[in-house]
Image: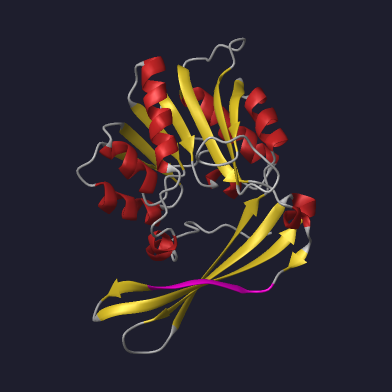
Amino acid sequence: MLEPTADPFAEIAPFYDLDLEGFDDDLALYLALAERAAARDGREDVLELGCGTGRVATALAGAGFGVAGVDYSAAMLDAARARTEGLPVRLVEGDMRSLALGERFGLVLVPLGGLQHLETTEDITAAFATMAVHLAPDGIAAIDVEAPHADDWLPGPRPLVEHWTRPLPCEGGEALVTKLVAIEGVPSASLRLVTWHFDVQPPSGPLRRVTQQFALRVITAGEIELAARLAGLRVDAWYGDYGGAPPRDGDERLIAVLSHDADDEPEDAP
């Protein structure tokens, strides 16, 4: 299994927004959930676990919600600070498995596969406990992961695939960045070992390759539901896409909307 570094995304943080360039499919859903949570609980505040470079936080804060964004990567948070300057966003370097802010929020989010960076069932249950202790009594939580597919359970390496080539502003003009991805399945551990290569060709000089390796967990609906119950949460709705359609075989996303279980009153936040 891959050994974590102090900041596993430090080297690739400059390319993260380039990778998600133009992607905003999930923002309308999160804005709708934030509005629903504010109507239910009266709180116009959001906790985003795994906030990355602030893509979701920027949209929510721009709509008037206060956002606390938490991420393990200091490099990602540096990019988020630049992106959210002047907006009601507070950024915290922390781990979603052990976070203790001593606050509650109307909406708690783990967007775009953030939960899949947790490699074990113990990690997953710890993250759900964090969500529960930070969620207001009448609040809403939402988790978005990749829907499991048959090829997630195939062992061994797969061919290297080129995803895109895009321009990146740099000193002296624009660099061309190409992203290549290799995946190795480890179904016995419900993991995919992922390698990202970013080949950077500056306006002049040699090609440079930046490589990052990490593991992504394949998370099923049953695992989400069980971890939620252990944390005193319940799944109120399942979506198979960002438009709120029910899940179907072959969907790309698996989205759970959760709240506190009525039979399990939340304790005070730490």
Comparing 267 with 43, the one in front is 43
Residue drawn at point x = 59 percent, y = 22 percent: 233
Residue 255 in the image, given as x and y percentages of width and height: 57, 37
Which secondary structure class fits the magenta region best? strand
For the N terminus, give its image quadrant: bottom right
Residue drawn at point x = 67 percent, y = 29 percent: 225
Q: Quadrant of residue 226?
A: top right
Residue 136 in view, yes or no? no
Q: Is residue 17 left or right of residue 86?
A: right
Comparing 240 with 107, the one in front is 240
Q: Is residue 214 left or right of residue 157?
A: left
Residue 236 in the image, given as x and y percentages of width and height: 58, 23
Residue 132 in the image, given as x and y percentages of width and height: 53, 24
Residue 3 in the image, given as x and y percentages of width and height: 62, 59
Q: Is residue 152 left or right of residue 103?
A: right
- Residue situated furthest left in the rendering: 86
Rendered view: 153 above or below 240: below
Residue 161 in view, yes or no? yes
- Residue situated furthest bottom in the rendering: 205
- Say whether residue 164 is magenta: yes
Rendered view: 46 above or below 160: above
Q: Please report the bounds of the magenta region as a residue range.
A: 159-166
Rendered view: 203 above or below 51: below
Q: How is the image coloured?
A: secondary structure
Residue drawn at point x = 38 percent, y = 40 percent: 69
- Say whether residue 253 is magenta: no
**Count the marks: how many?**
0
Q: Quadrant of residue 230?
A: top right
